[in-house]
Image: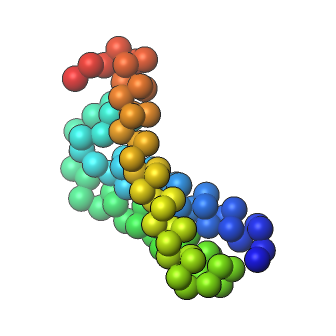
Amino acid sequence: MNAWLVVAAALAGVTGTWLLYLASPQQQWRAPDPSPGRHRAWPGALCLLLSLVLAWPTMGPVEAVSAWLVLVMLVASLAPFVGAWRARRRGDTR
């Protein structure tokens, strides 16, 4: 197993999940953007796909998919809490 590919896959997975969270209009990480966000999910989806593609040859198919899903679920469940903390620090209590 090549450690650099695993690290790159993990970073791409975390980045992709953050980008998908930021594409949501209800997120609290940044101030609300009035522009319509129809195509904001594409960069996150591409990062997640890159993450899976990088993990696939290093871990094998079953291990790569399960590790990828665990990473995405972990980051996706922590993102709202980090967003609420950042909104509180900004003083934005929406």
Q: Quadrant of residue 7?
A: bottom right
Rendered position, 57 above or below 16: below
Would residue 6 be seen by someone viewing this image from the given angle? yes
Residue 82 located left or right of residue 23:
right
Any part of residue 50 in sight: no
Position of residue 6 measured from the top left corner of the image (x, y, whole percent): 68, 68
Camera-side residue of 22 and 59? 59
Left or right for 46, reference 26: right
Residue 68 in percent (x, y) is at 51, 68
Which residue is at the front of the view, 52 or 70? 70
Q: Is residue 71 above or below residue 77?
A: below
Residue located at (26% from left, 52% from top)? 37
- Asked if 7 appears above or below 86 in the picture, the reply is below
How many circles with numbers are drawn on the protein? 0
Residue at (76, 77) in percent of width and height: 1
The residue positioned 67% from the left and 64% from the top of the image is: 8
Q: Left or right? Give the position of 83 relative to 59.
A: left
> Where is residue 79, by image quadrant?
top left
Q: Determine whether, in the image, residue 40 is placed left or right of residue 75.
A: left
Quadrant (top left/top right/bottom left/bottom right) for the C terminus: top left
Location of residue 61 in the rendering, given as x and y in whole percent from the top left corner: 55, 85
Q: Measured from the top left, where is residue 89 in percent x and y?
A: 43, 17
Q: Colour scheme in the image?
A: rainbow
Which residue is rendered at x = 39% and y = 34% of the image? 81
